């Protein structure tokens, strides 16, 4: 938590960082703390505090609704990166009836930053690929903070080819800051692995649905995101570079990240208006981490609806439609 955030926290009676709330949610944190205190008092005494607790909960919901209805792009990016936001495997456990994961790229190593496997949703079989971040230091190191290396993308390539071989639809979940930029990854062909995935996805003769569930960063996201239908969670982001990275290049300072986020139009509503995203998947009040079950149910419905729409497309037309979709991105006209 930076100095400005700590000052704001002190203003609301608590200078300790709280992983459940980001800086602009501190007024909500204050109300939630009062509710928790009253619940403890009520449980340990004969005082009737139910009415006051209900009033505070209503105030908290109203305040959350007010704050989230006016968030800027930088604030949304903070929610997209929230440490308690559900990751790919959280959704897999709630959405899939069955899931069998496979490992390794059959060339170099296993990369836990990407998960692949065969799954079933509502009795529909499909192939799944998703970025996976970790919780806590140990798992984050094991998952490389959700930043895949070449072997991760080559494992994803295995899954793509398997989908086409067995004529199964492909579902991908995007949630990464970007591909890992380390020297070893570059030596093993990071850019080639991403380019090969893009070429392969552009030619797959099966329906592809891609969902941005958190942050979709750079080519590391696009490498598994060339779908016939692109879905975005309401408080997710999708961009060619992180706001901090863009600010460092254009503003010569990462402190201008808020300005960069606004300029890049990285949020779901902007990308939907630009025609890059096909569907915005609604999140529970306060973000997906506030109610993972509801978030998963909304996502499941959106995924099934997207695949249903693709059923009417002839297999021979999928590739042509997909290529036209991505070729049209960035086109504009001057009146």
Image (cartoon, rainbow, N blue to C red):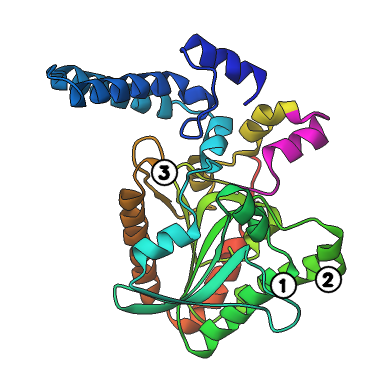
Q: Is residue 28 magenta?
A: no
Circle on res. 188: 2
**Would you place residue 21 above or below residue 15 in this image?**
below
Q: Is residue 303 left or right of residue 252?
A: left
- Which numbered disc covers residue 162? none
Picture residue at 58% right of the left edge, 55% below the top:
133
The disc, 2 or 1, on the residue closer to the chain's N-terminal end is: 1
Q: What is the C-alpha distance between the residues marked 3 and 1?
A: 30 Å
Quadrant housing the N terminus: top right
Tell me residue 216's x, y (percent). Answer: 60, 51
Residue at numbered disc 3: 289
Give how far across and how far down residue 333 sits, in percent.
Answer: 64, 46
Quadrant for the C terminus, please: top right
Name the side, left or right, on which 252 lies relative to 93: right
Q: Is residue 248 visible?
A: yes
Q: Residue at x 16, y 18 (%)?
A: 49
**Residue 47 picture location, percent across and down:** 14, 16
Q: Are marks 2 and 1 in contact (CB under 8 Å)?
A: yes
Residue 273 horizontal/vertical position (percent): 49, 44
Q: Which range of residues does the magenta coloring cover?
A: 238-254
Q: Residue furthest bottom?
A: 165
Of the two numbered discs 3 and 2 on the same chain, state the one appearing first in sequence.
2
The quarter holding residue 251 reads: top right
Front-most of residues 107 and 331: 107
Q: Is residue 68 above or below residue 189?
A: above
Residue pointed to by mark 1: 151
Q: Residue at x 72, y 72 (%)?
A: 151
């Amino acid at each position: 938590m930076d100095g400005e955030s700590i000052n704001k926290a002190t203003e609301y009676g608590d200078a300790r960082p709280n992983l459940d709330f980001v800086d602009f949610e501190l007024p909500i944190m204050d109300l939630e703390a009062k509710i928790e205190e009253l619940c403890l008092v009520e449980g340990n005494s004969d005082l009737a505090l139910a009415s006051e607790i209900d009033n505070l909960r209503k105030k908290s919901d109203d305040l959350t609704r007010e704050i989230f209805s006016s968030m800027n792009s930088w604030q949304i990016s903070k929610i997209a990166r929230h440490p308690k936001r559900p990751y790919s495997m959280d959704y897999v456990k709630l959405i899939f009836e069955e899931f069998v994961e496979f490992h390794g790229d059959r060339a170099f190593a296993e990369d836990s930053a990407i998960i692949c496997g065969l799954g079933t949703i509502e009795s529909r079989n499909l192939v799944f690929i998703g970025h996976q971040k970790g919780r806590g230091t140990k798992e984050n190191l094991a998952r490389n903070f959700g930043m895949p290396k070449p072997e991760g993308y080559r494992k994803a390539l295995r899954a793509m080819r398997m989908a086409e071989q067995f004529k199964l639809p492909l579902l991908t979940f995007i949630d990464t800051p970007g591909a890992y930029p380390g020297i070893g990854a570059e030596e093993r062909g990071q850019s080639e692995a991403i380019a090969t995935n893009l070429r392969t996805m552009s030619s797959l003769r099966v329906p592809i649905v891609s969902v941005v569930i958190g942050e979709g960063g750079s080519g590391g996201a696009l490498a598994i995101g060339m779908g016939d239908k692109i879905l975005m969670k309401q408080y997710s982001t999708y961009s060619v570079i992180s706001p901090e990275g863009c600010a460092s290049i254009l503003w010569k300072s990462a402190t201008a990240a808020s300005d960069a986020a606004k300029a890049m139009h990285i949020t779901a509503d902007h990308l939907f208006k630009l025609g890059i995203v096909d569907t915005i998947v609604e999140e529970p009040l306060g973000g997906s981490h506030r109610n993972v079950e509801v978030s998963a149910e909304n996502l499941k419905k959106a995924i099934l609806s997207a695949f249903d729409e693709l059923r009417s497309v002839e297999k021979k037309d999928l590739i042509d439609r997909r290529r036209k979709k991505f070729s049209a991105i960035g086109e504009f006209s001057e009146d």
